[in-house]
Image (cartoon, rainbow, N blue to C red):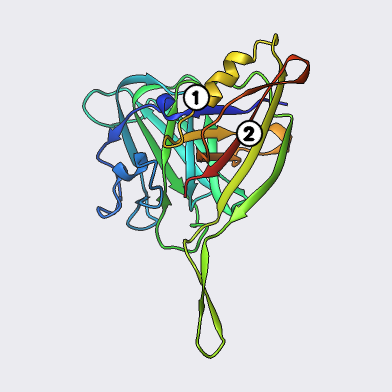
Amino acid sequence: MANYIIKNSDNFLEYTAETSVNIDSDFPVANLYNYTHPQKNCRSNDTSATRIIIDLGSATEVLAVVLTSCNFDTCNILGDAAADGFGDPDFTLNSQTINLDDRVMRYKGYIALTDFEYRYLAIEPSGIPTDGESFYWLDCLVCLDNITPLTRNPNFIIPHEHNQAYYDNEFSGGGIERIVRGLRKKFKVELDYLVTADSGMESELNQLTGLHVGDPFIIYENGAYGGDSSKVYLAYIETNLKWERRSNNLLGTVLTVEEII
């Protein structure tokens, strides 16, 4: 069983939007790195050939990409080393499956890359849009050059909590109208770590507790507990973290994570 991968926004590779193919000008590629407002997504004009292209600035090693939410279940990933714009691809990874995360009922994916060191990276969605729309959309695209997993997984996971904001509008005649706020559920999970002080995990706990409440980060289950590649979340921690020294020289911390939607 693999261990969780947790990376804060300092580990997100910076990139800019490159001239792309079949992109709606009102929903540009630049929206893909607006990590705090994922619903300002990137969209195609229709479902004809679409190529979402980003510029990493120079030849850059990318070990994984994260598609935080999208309406397609298959895509190609391309790379190009050209210095003056995306041309004929030098790297092709075809027919990558994007799975449905049944916890939040959205298509998401963590895709590991091998031997990718190029300036330009492109995503080509394909297939019938999963939500019945006449175009493709992608919320955010995160590129990582560090995918070192945690030394160990949480001891246990407190049941996942799904929250959807709403309010009840009460009428003078006694009726109630429920107004649901937001299009998607919030996803929250608590992860508990308990390790011995001499296990080498103290420095790792320091890294986890150094996550800032205002900074997005990626948490990927990496196959732990039977989850597939859709179990990856762009998230905030809900509160400032700390670790504590418990009985028998044990160290522990609890992470409460809420997905950014």
Task: Name the residue that disc number 1 marks.
Answer: 210
Q: Which of 155 and 67 is in front in this view?
A: 155
Could you tell me the amino acid type at mark 1? Answer: Gly
Q: Residue furthest left?
A: 84
Q: Position of residue 43 (x, y in %)?
A: 35, 52
Residue drawn at point x = 35 percent, y = 53 percent: 44
The answer to whether residue 97 shows anywhere in this view is no
Closer to viewer: mark 2 or mark 1:
1
Q: Which residue lies furthest to the bottom in this view?
A: 173
Which quadrant does the N terminus fall into? top right
The answer to whether residue 227 shows anywhere in this view is yes
Residue 221, labelled with which disc?
Answer: 2
Task: Relative to 50, say whether 195 is above or below.
Answer: above
Could you tell me the amino acid type at mark 2? Answer: Glu
Residue drawn at point x = 38 percent, y = 47 percent: 37
Label 1 element class? loop
